[in-house]
Amino acid sequence: MKTFICYLTIFLTSINLFSQDLNVSLKDNKLQGKVIKVEEYTYRYDSNIDGYYIESISEIIYNKNGNMTTNIYQYFGSYYQSKSTTTYSYNNNKLIGDATEVISLLDNKTTNTSTNYIYTNNLLTKREYISEYPSIIEYSYDSKGNLLQAISKNNTGETTAIYDYLNYKNSDSYTKIYKYFYKGSQESTSTYLYENGNNISYSFLGKNSSSFYKYTYDSYGNTLETIMNDNVLSSYNYEYSSDGNWLKKRYAYKSTYEDKTYNVFSFRKITYANGKTVGNTNFDIPFIKKYEQKNEYVLKTLEKKEIFNPLEDPEKVDKIYVLKTEGEKFKVKTDKDVYLTSKVSAVKHTNLVDMIVYHPKSNTTAIARNFSDNLTRQEMWMEATIISNTHNMFWCVNENKNWYITDKGTAFKDYNLYTVKYSTTNPNDVIMYKDNVATYIMRDFKNAIAHKLYTLEKI
């Protein structure tokens, strides 16, 4: 399993900042009544086994005040399997800390993170995220106690994100604007519109891309549809308990790469404080039959496909495939099913959605397009575009003509050792000098297209 470093900086998963977005209360999770435990099993069909398998299992426990105390989640994919356990601590009914342990079930590697929540006058004013890449978030409020702004900083004190909160109708209806920064320069803006606690729209504006999504909900606040440009990308169907908690759910989404719709089915058992239980987590064939027609409905065991031969490392690669597993983690293989995951390096492209992959043995560089797009589905192999098997250093510019270099699938680290000047021979070219010696050339720099990779030529 590999994760990758952002081309520009460490690219962390976006964190919900507002205290009402912590998703630790019964209200946050759309649960009715005095619920103390929710158990959930998720099933999906896999054509490789011609049957269904358990994709995930979760168990969430709440205290008598309706706050989450434990969240256990297990994921069972072909290429990645994990178990995460998060525990939450409270003081006077306020969340003051959480701790998460994630265990990879295929290699038994463990990752631990934790968060401290600090309050001033009963308002959350600081969040400290403790991990390999620590960060902090600081909050400010108006005189009415409405959150105005949250600023995220990395471990060097550099601002990486700013969230602005405005247009309050009430505490559940407002606008949230997220601005992502790199070295003081704003790279993208995301706008979230909330009504009655539900995110009803999301827009993204980057330097090289934009998108707009709308979301619809039922009377209980559960998502019904995700819509992009008037096209339904995903939809949900539910069956409820008498008090309005869903017990059965069908989630349908369209593939990014195929003209096909996939279904995922979830079933819950809910336990209340008085000992009453409703629902179950069993494989419910009658419910599945309403939405998916198969020759038979059989629950099977999914084959683990993690293993690769560590001695097999080809000198020539014709095709490279990338599999997104969880978050920013991935697998890499060739068209001959030779796994290269442990042998490649990877870096996020300057457009913040593509990933550049480099395999040293074959000297192959490829681009996994849209890897970081939220619509890129886990557990689906996508073919990366091979851009070279002869060169391993590339340069590109952004819209402001700031230039960046990738060196064998990693971010270039020696910018401070070089100076750059326009060529006296061809004024469109840029020459890189080290110790006053011309070392590299960026040809036709003045006409470079933003975010397109060009070969960095050694002089």
Image: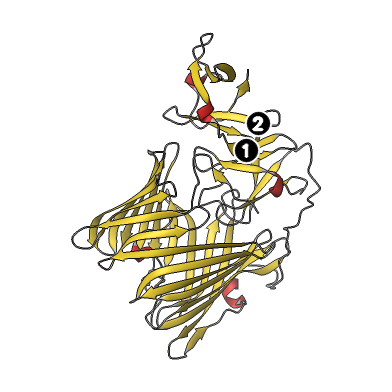
The x, y position of residue 96, in whole percent, is 38, 69
Tell me the number on the disc at residue 392.
2
Query: How dense is the environment of label 1, judged by Cα within 10 Å: few (below 14), some, or many (20 and up)?
Result: many
Is residue 345 something one can see in this rendering? yes
Along the viewing direction, whichever of 89 and 366 lies nearer the viewer: 89
Q: Disc 1 residue type?
A: Gly
- Disc 2 vs disc 1: Cβ atoms closer than 8 Å? yes
Q: Position of residue 3 (x, y in %)?
A: 60, 50
* Residue at image point 41% right, 68% down: 23
Lower position in the chain sequence, tag 2 or tag 1: 2
Query: Which mark, by number, is residue 381?
Result: none
* Label 1 secondary element: loop
Q: Is residue 197 visible?
A: no
* Left or right: 147, with 84 as reference point: left
Left or right? Give the position of 199 relative to 72.
Answer: left
Could you tell me residue 414's position as x and y percent? 55, 31
Q: Position of residue 241 (x, y in %)?
A: 45, 81
Question: For the residues marked 2 and 1, what is the alpha-carbon distance in whole angstroms?
Answer: 8 Å
| Residue named by callout 1 | 409
Where's the N terminus, which quadrant? Answer: bottom right
Residue at horizontal 53 percent and vertical 48 percent from the top: 372
Extreme residue toward the left, this view: 143
Q: Nearer the viewer, residue 128 or 201?
A: 128
Question: For the residue marked with disc 2, what is the amino acid?
Answer: Asn
Label 2 residue SS: loop
Q: In the image, 346: left or right of 11?
A: right
